[in-house]
Image (cartoon, grey):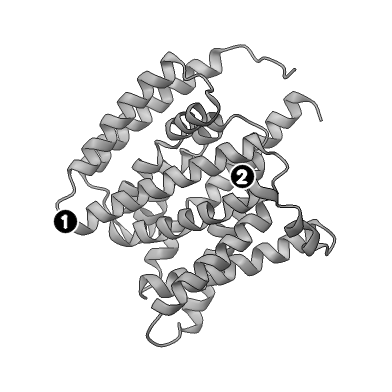
């Protein structure tokens, strides 16, 4: 596969993963049950769907996929579990718009992680855009008047930071198979949540929503995004992922009329302006073939 075709392949997968991921807030709003029950069943369905995908992709040789994870793959499992838990929890404690605005800093967090890890240089445009995006985050975070919003914003950043580390790892170790990583992470999530699950079993409708939630946002979306992320720079994958910032609140507004609030709109606009300015400059740069 040529450099150009690999890059196109990566962009398509990351874009599809982002669109799938953006439906998460919609699923959470459809479920009038407690956080731990949502996390437990969503993780179970995500793990099962990823195991099924893995069996299809590897001709039934699931055991070999787990045996080949290596140290990077084993390290990615708890990070993926943290990202999964933080994502769903953040949506329960603050608005979808707040979560998506904080997630919008992913390309800059990924660039910072790459610099710390590999000393990959951070350009002037990235530094400027990061500062503007950080100002937007301060507007959103500073507007939190309830403890739930503060906790939700913190969880959203934990999700963003852990996902940024995984994204950089997938780029540095392209041999990592993300399906077994995320499948095991989903089962780790389920095991951690099991002691905290209480109340009656979900209704048949809630089970159907939980199954769709696990398959799409924790199974298919992770697989598409992180597989595509192997073929493009982490910062570029993060930028494409910012489609989520627009689509996530849009689905929830369309279905439930959840207003994002003025601080989220102002802060989100700053973040999107920073990213748009950075991306416009990157698109004007001539393509450089891989060596």
**286 relative position to 207: left or right:** right
Q: Residues within 10 Å of mark 2 (few under 14, many from 20)?
A: many
Q: Which structural element holds mark 1?
A: loop
* Location of the N terminus (image quadrant): top right
* Residue bearing mark 1: 146
Residue 38 spot, x, y in % from top left: 43, 71
Residue 44 spot, x, y in % from top left: 56, 71
Residue furthest right as drawn:
59
Q: Foreground residue, 92 or 20?
A: 92
Mark 2 and mark 1 lie on one chain; the one further toward the N terminus is 1
For the point 66% across and 44% down, which residue is it?
227
Is residue 189 among what the camera can see? yes
Residue 38 is tagged as none
For the point 36% across and 19% down, which residue is it?
128
* Residue bearing mark 2: 226
* Location of the C terminus (image quadrant): top right
Q: Residues within 10 Å of mark 1 (few under 14, many from 20)?
A: few
Residue 233 placement: quadrant: top right
Counting labels gives: 2
Residue 246 spot, x, y in % from top left: 41, 42
For the point 71% across and 36% down, which residue is it?
9
**81 relative position to 246: left or right:** right
Residue 193 placement: quadrant: bottom left
Q: Foreground residue, 63 or 91?
A: 63
Task: From this view, report whether residue 138 is shown above or below residue 36.
Answer: above
Alpha carbon of mark 2 to alpha carbon of mark 1: how far? 34 Å
**136 relative position to 192: left or right:** left
For the point 46% across and 16% down, which residue is it?
123
């Amino acid at each position: 596969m040529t450099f150009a075709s690999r890059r196109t392949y990566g962009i398509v997968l990351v874009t599809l993963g982002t669109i799938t991921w953006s439906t998460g807030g919609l699923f959470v709003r459809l479920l009038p049950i407690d956080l731990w029950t949502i996390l437990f069943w969503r993780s179970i369905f995500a793990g099962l769907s990823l195991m099924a995908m893995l069996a299809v992709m590897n001709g039934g040789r699931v055991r070999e996929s787990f045996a080949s994870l290596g140290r990077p793959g084993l390290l990615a499992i708890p990070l993926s579990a943290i990202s999964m838990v933080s994502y769903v929890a953040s949506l329960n404690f603050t608005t979808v718009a707040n979560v998506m605005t904080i997630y919008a800093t992913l390309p800059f967090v990924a660039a910072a992680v790459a610099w710390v890890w590999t000393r990959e240089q951070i350009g002037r445009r990235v530094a400027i855009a990061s500062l503007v995006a950080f100002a937007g985050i301060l507007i959103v975070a500073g507007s939190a008047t309830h403890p739930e919003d503060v906790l939700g914003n913190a969880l959203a950043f934990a999700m963003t930071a852990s996902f940024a580390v995984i994204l950089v790892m997938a780029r540095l170790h392209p041999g990592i198979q993300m399906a077994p990583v995320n499948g095991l992470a989903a089962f780790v999530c389920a095991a951690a949540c099991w002691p905290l699950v209480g109340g009656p079993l979900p209704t048949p409708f809630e089970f159907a929503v939980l199954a769709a939630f696990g398959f799409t946002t924790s199974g298919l979306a992770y697989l598409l995004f992180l597989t595509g992320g192997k073929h493009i720079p982490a910062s570029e994958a993060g930028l494409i992922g910012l489609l989520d910032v627009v689509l996530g609140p849009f689905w929830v507004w369309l279905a439930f009329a959840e207003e994002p609030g003025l601080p989220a709109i102002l802060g989100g606009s700053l973040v999107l302006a920073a990213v748009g300015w950075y991306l416009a400059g990157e698109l004007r740069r001539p393509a450089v073939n891989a060596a």
